[in-house]
Amino acid sequence: MVFDNSKEKLSGIKAELESYLGSLRLCLHRNKSRVYPVKDGVRFLGYRIFPTHRLVAKANILAMRRRMHRYSRQYREGEISLAQVRQCIQSWIGHACHADSYRLRSRLLTGVAFQRGKAGGAPWGLVEQQP
């Protein structure tokens, strides 16, 4: 990734990269290497990267919300343990911590409840029940 405010300078850098890679018998992907405004950010490894900050990509957030619902259902039905749920959530939190995501994590995880055997009520909330 190369960031700059000058479109001409970026086009020149891209041409130099193409020339260098050509000498190695490599080439840039036509659709994935382009010059576009910095305000759009760059999607990379589940983040939206800007020159001043990083955000978690929206697709990643939506996928985690779906997973939370699935984990809640699986825990309620006894398919997975609370330890497995915690591992999965902690893994995602570890990924999200590398971005500016404090409010996102708070919003996503606040009020999350996992209860065994209850079909009704709130689908979320981290509640540990004794067997």
Image (cartoon, grey):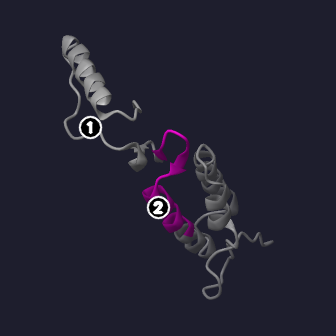
| Amino acid tagged 2 | Ala
Closer to the chain start, of discs 1 and 2, is: 1
Residue underneath mark 1: 34
* Magenta-span inclusion, residue 62: yes
Determine the residue positioned at 62% across, 66% down: 108
Q: Could you tell me the amino acid type at mark 1? A: Arg
Q: Residue furthest top?
A: 23
Disc 1: CA contacts within 10 A as few (<14), some (14-19) or many (>=20): few
The dot on residue 15 is: none
Left or right: 47 as drawn, with respect to 130: left
Q: Residue at x 65, y 60 (%)?
A: 103
Reply above or below: 28 against 35. Answer: above
Image disc number at residue 63:
2
| Residue at 25% across, 14% down | 20
Q: Which residues, given as a range, are shown in magenta?
A: 48-68
- Which corner quadrant of the image does residue 24 belong to? top left
Residue at 60% in and 43% down: 98
Compared to residue 130, the image places residue 94 above or below, namely: above
Q: Farthest residue to the bottom: give it.
A: 120
Q: Where's residue 73, x and y in %?
A: 56, 74
Q: Does dot 1 land on a helix, a strand or a loop? A: loop
Per the image, is 74 magenta?
A: no
Q: Nearer the viewer, residue 49 or 89?
A: 49
65 sits left or right of 111 in the view = left
Asked which secondary structure carries label 2, the reply is: helix
State the separation of the CA atoms marked 1 and 2. 27 Å
Image x and y of residue 83, in percent: 69, 57
